[in-house]
Amino acid sequence: MYKVLIVDDEMYAVMGIKSGVDWEALQVSEIYEAYNLRDALKVFERTAIDVMICDIEMPKGTGIELLERVNDISPETETIFLTAHAHFDFMQRAIQLDGFDYLLKPIEYDVLKSSIARALESVRQEREMTELRARYNETWQKRKGLITEKFWNDVLTRRINCTPDNVLKILQEHELLALSGTTFMPVLVSVESWMREYSTRDEEMMEYNVRKAAEEMMLDPGRGEVIQTKQGVNVVILYGPEDGEILEDTLYDRCMAYLESCRRYFHCTLSCYIGEPSTLFGIGETYQKLLEMEYGNLNKSNEVYRLAGFEPESGQVPAAKLRNWIQLLELGKLEDVERDLKTCLAAQRLIPVMSEKESHPSVIQRVQGYIAEHLHEPITREQLACCVHLNPAYLSRLFKRETGESITDYILRERMEAAKEMIRESSMPISDVAKSLGYYNFSHFSKMFKKVHHASPQQVRRKSV
C-alpha cells in the first residue's frame, strides 16, 4: 500500500483531488494534505511519502522550492506538478529536479489517476531494486567474509606464497586490493577454560560471542578482521591506520579490558598474545611465533603477552623445540623426542612424559586414560593439560580435532556411561550413583543422563530388572 501527499494553497483543489480519484484502485491507503511548503515538510517529518501531488504557484513557497527540499530529505518520493499556467521556466526546472510529471489545471481526474498510477509503478520498481540491491549486498558481504577468512587462513598458515613480487596479484585475486601497502598486527586469542559446563555446540556459540566481542573491543571500524583458523585458533588481525602506526600500548589496554569482559559476560578465562607489526609476507611467521608462545605457556592464564622482547622463562623449553616435540608426541613418535632430549638440557620438564615408554600412549590416549582414572572426581581442563604438559587452549583444540567432540562432552559421556552401567548392574540407589560421579543435584544428573542416553535413569533401571 502507498501514501500520497496533496499540496495546494486552495482548499477546494485539495478536496477535489481527494474525492475525484479512485484511490483504492491505486492501492493508496493514506492521503495527506498540506496548504503550504512548511506544512508539507512537517508531513515528511512524520511519515514516508510515495507520491506528492503539488501545485507549483503558491504564495508561501513554490512547488519548485518544495521539491528542492524534498529531494534532500526523501529522494525516493515521486512528484507530480499541477499548474494553471504552462510556464517554460517552471517546466524546465521541474525536469531538472527530476519531477515525475507536469499537468495543467483544470485537471481531468482520469488523466491524474493515470499519472499517479505510473508514478506509483515507478515507486514499486524502485522498491524492488532497493530490496534486490540489499539482498545482493548481503550476499556479497557474506561471500566477501568467506573470501577474507579463507585468505587469512591461507596467509597465516603460509599456504600462499606472499612474496613482495606477487602480493598485488594475490590481493587482486581475493578482491582485497584495499589492503595493499597495509601493515598488520596479529593477536592470538587463546580460550583457556570455561567457568560453566557447556556442550560442544554451546562452546562453539560462546566462542563465536568471544570473537564478536574481540571485533567490537579491539578493532576500529573497518580496520581489521577476526577469524577462526581451520585448526580452531581465534586470531584478531588489525589493519594499520592509514595515518600512522598501530599503537601497541592502546592495543594492550584494549586486550586487558577484553579479558575482563569475557570473564564477566562469557564466563571464560583466556589470554591474548600480541604480535608485532608485519607486512603481508611476514605475518605468517609472526603468527607461528605467537603459536609457539601459546604452546610454551603451561602455567599462566588470563594474561596479555607481547611478542616484542618475549623470551622463555629460565628453564622453560624453547618454543621452537616445544612445538616440534608436541607434533612428534601427537604422532606417537616418543623415541624421536627422547633422542632430541638428550641434547637439550632445557627439556627437563618434559622428561615425565617419557616415563611411560612401554605403552607409548598418544596425547589423546593419555588424556582419556586420566579421565577414566578420575571419573569420580572433579576434572578440569587445566588438570588434563598439566598431565600431558600442554597449554589448556591448545589441548582443547587438539582433543576436539582428533575426537570430534569437546573435552567437556567426552567427560559427560564417559560419566553417563559409567552411571548407566552401575544402574543396570547394581542395586545401588540412583541418587547414590549420581553422588558417586560428583552429581549432588539429582535433577541435574537426570537431565544430563537423559541428554546422553535419551532415557531417564529410572527407565534404564526398570528395563534391567
Image (cartoon, rainbow, N blue to C red):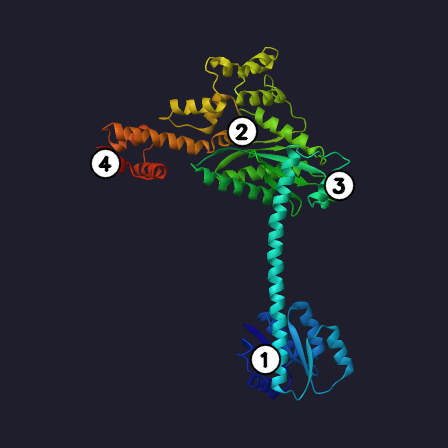
Q: Residue at x 48, y 27 (%)?
A: 382
Give residue 394's mark. Answer: 2
The residue positioned 74% from the left and 75% from the top of the image is 95
User: Is the residue 231 above or below the residue 97 in the image?
Assistant: above
Q: Is residue 150 above or below residue 37?
A: above
Where residue 136 sits, quadrant-wise, is bottom right
- Callout 3 secondary element: helix
> Label 2 vs label 1: CA separation?
68 Å
Q: Which residue is mark 1?
A: 33
Contact between marks 2 and 4 (CB within 8 A): the answer is no
Q: Amino acid at mark 4?
A: Arg
Q: Disc 3 marks which residue?
A: 168
In the drawing, does residue 35 fall left or right of residue 192? right
Q: Is residue 61 visible?
A: no
**The N terminus: image quadrant:** bottom right
Crowding near pointer 1: few (<14 within 10 Å), some, many (20+)?
A: some
Closest to the camera, between mark 2 and mark 4, is 4
User: What number is the disc on residue 462?
Assistant: 4
Res. 296 image quadrant: top right
User: Is 171 left or right of 144, judged from the image as shown?
Assistant: right
